[in-house]
Structures are given as C-alpha cells and as structure tokens.
Image (tube, helix red, strand yellow):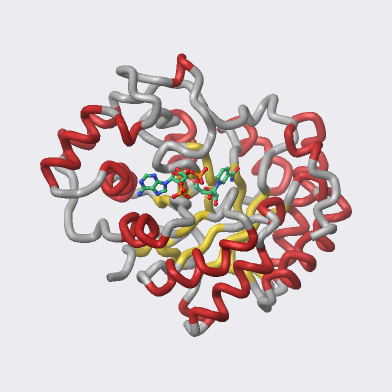
Amino acid sequence: MTSTTITLNNGVEMPALGLGVFLTPAGQTADAVSTAIGNGYRLIDTAAAYMNERAVGDGIRASGLDRDELFVTTKLWPGQYGDQAVHGFAASLDRLGLEHVDLYLLHWPVPTAFDATVKAYRAMDEMRAEGRVRTIGVCNFLPHRLQRLEEETGLVPALNQIELNPYYTQPATRAANAERGIFTQAWAPIGGTYQRNQDAVTNGAASPLEHPLITSLAQKYGKTPAQVVIRWHLDHGLSAIPKSVHAKRIGENFDVFDFSLAPEEIAEIDTLDTGVRAGGDPETFTAYSYLTDIDAQ
Ligand code: NDP
C-alpha cells in the first residue's frame, strides 16, 4: 500500500500520510520508524527537540529502503533561531546521519523575538539553495505571522504544520494557508497526546476517537476510529502524521487507502470543532524556552 502524494508549491512531492515521533522514546524510535517503512510509510516527521533524530536515522537504515524513496522532515528549535540556525541544522543532519532532509521547518514562531524567527527562516532558505534541504516551511504560524514572514523575506513557506483534528479544525489558518499556496499538514491528527480541558471536549468524549459520530462511522466502514479520522484528513486534501509506538497501530493508521468518506460525512465531522486547542497557543506558548540544551543529545 502507498500513500497518496501531494505536490508542494515548489514542485516537490510529499506523501500525504506519515509517521510522527513526538514523545516516542529514543529507545523505541528506530523500531517504530522501520516498522512504519515496512508498512508502506514514506514520510517520517521528527524534530531536534524530540531527542530521537539519531534513532530515526537508525530506523531508516534498518529498513533497508533507499534514502531517495523517503521523505524526512525535521525542525529547528527556537533556542537555535538567529545566529544558531546553521549550527542547529548541521547538528540535526549529523544526528540523523543523512546528507539532506526533505523538509525543514521552524518549530514555533517566537512572537517576542520574531526578528530571530525571520533570521532563522532566511538561513533555512540558504540551506535550501545549497541543496541540503529540498523544502522549507513553518509550524504553528497564524495568518498574521505568515503575512509578516512574507513581508520581511519575500518567501512563501511550502507548508505550515498546525494542530488539526476534528476537535480543532482551524478553518481560518487553513484558509490563509490555501490563499498563499501553503500546504496544511496536521499535527495531533487523531487527537494528540495532550490532555484536553473541558472546553475542548465535545459530547462527553475526551478524544475524537471516542466521539459517537466517529465510532459509528468506524462501524459503518469496518474501520477503527483512528482510521476514520485519518481518512477525514486525507479526504480534505490535508497531510497527517499520526504517532504511535505500537506496531499494530502503526499498521492500522496506514491502512486507510481502501475507503473514503462521503462528502456529507466529512462535513458532519467538521461540526465537531470546539475551537479550543489542546496544544500550545502560538502567540503565548513559551515552553520552548525550557529546552535550552538541545545539543546535549
Ligand atoms: P497524534 O494525534 O498522532 O496522537 C498520538 C496519540 O494517539 C498517542 O498517544 C498514540 O499512542 C495514540 N494512537 C496512535 N495510533 C492510535 C490508534 N490507531 N488508536 C488509538 N490511539 C492511537 O498526536 P501527536 O501529538 O503525536 O502528533 C503527531 C505528530 O505531529 C507528532 O508525533 C509530531 O511528529 C508532530 N507534532 C508537531 C508539533 C509541532 O509543533 N510542529 C506538535 C506536536 C506534534 P501510542 O503511541 O501509545 O500508540
């Protein structure tokens, strides 16, 4: 089975469905990655901050797959914005054991130091021009941040990776991405690893995977709730990078290319939006300031 492919605004092709490894312990990452590749995944999403880039590289090599058949994403951590960006990238490549990455992303905007954010993006564009990165983009950029980045650099990211699942559908940011030709990729695609607060819960179901609409569609299609939610992303033309450390779930999350949802079912799932994030708010999130020793891995 193979994932559908998306063409980004610079012509680079990217698989729509991939494996995320946030909170995958380094000791389990190589297995998760090689299991995913064995199941047909060709997109792996990691980050310097996930502390598992070395293990991602090990998993890729263990899979035996040719590097050119894979699409590898990693991310620059805010602690290395500004002058540290080139070093941060070289360290990621070194840990991964790769000569290039397919997609390099700014992990978060830093509203209190947006100049450093912009400077890092310019540095990433130079890495792209040198051929060490095929594509560059951002994560967690709200529309006004995309606008400012474009005004200051003249650059339009290929992709914006944002929190996105049936409980938090981000219509405004998706529309702003689409207007600029920026592709939307969903993190926390099946509900994420963060505990949702009461405002972010609907119909008593703490996770979209437990919502009666999703479970009834799962029953209808003979699929699992996770597969229905992943299909919702794909049927919207989005990219999703679900994470799991379990071989069975890794396989399950990729086994979604033999069915699709009806337009009215997609629209019904859209109505589950609570408008409330479970993860960090890009305008106030500062948790990245605690992870200062990114090189000590
Ligand atoms: P996901 O929506 O992928 O959810 C992961 C959780 O769902 C884990 O607890 C996992 O548990 C569980 N799970 C996985 N498969 C199934 C299944 N079939 N049935 C039931 N439960 C399942 O959330 P993430 O936060 O991990 O987001 C995905 C990826 O997005 C990350 O791994 C990372 O690569 C990226 N990301 C990017 C961010 C950014 O700021 N750019 C922020 C956060 C994430 P288990 O592992 O035990 O199976």
**Quarter of the image with the N terminus in it:** bottom left
Classify residue 226 by image quadrant.
Answer: top left
Is residue 156 in view from this perspective? no
Instruction: Kindly give the residue lying farthest to the left in the view shown.
Output: 220
- Where residue 16 sits in the image (x, y, percent)? 39, 58
- Where residue 284 sits in the image (x, y, percent)? 69, 25
Q: Residue at x 63, y 68 (%)?
A: 55
Q: Residue at x 42, y 50 (%)?
A: 240
Is residue 174 in view from this perspective? yes
Q: Residue at x 60, y 67 (%)?
A: 56
As drawn, 261 above or below 113 = below
- Where residue 252 sits in the image (x, y, percent)? 31, 57
Classify residue 38 by image quadrant.
Answer: bottom left
For this rendering, which residue is in front, 156 or 68? 68
As drawn, 117 above or below 205 = below
Q: Residue at x 34, y 24 (%)?
A: 205
- Count of marks placed on residues: 0
- Where residue 147 sits in the image (x, y, percent)? 62, 36
Left or right placement of residue 99 versus residue 231 in this view: right
For this rendering, which residue is in front, 87 or 221? 221
Left or right placement of residue 58 versus residue 124 in this view: left
Left or right placement of residue 152 versus residue 277 in this view: right
Instruction: Kindly give the residue lying farthest to the top in the view shown.
Output: 199
Classify residue 216 by image quadrant.
Answer: top left
**Quarter of the image with the C terminus in it:** bottom right
Left or right placement of residue 259 versus residue 40 in this view: left
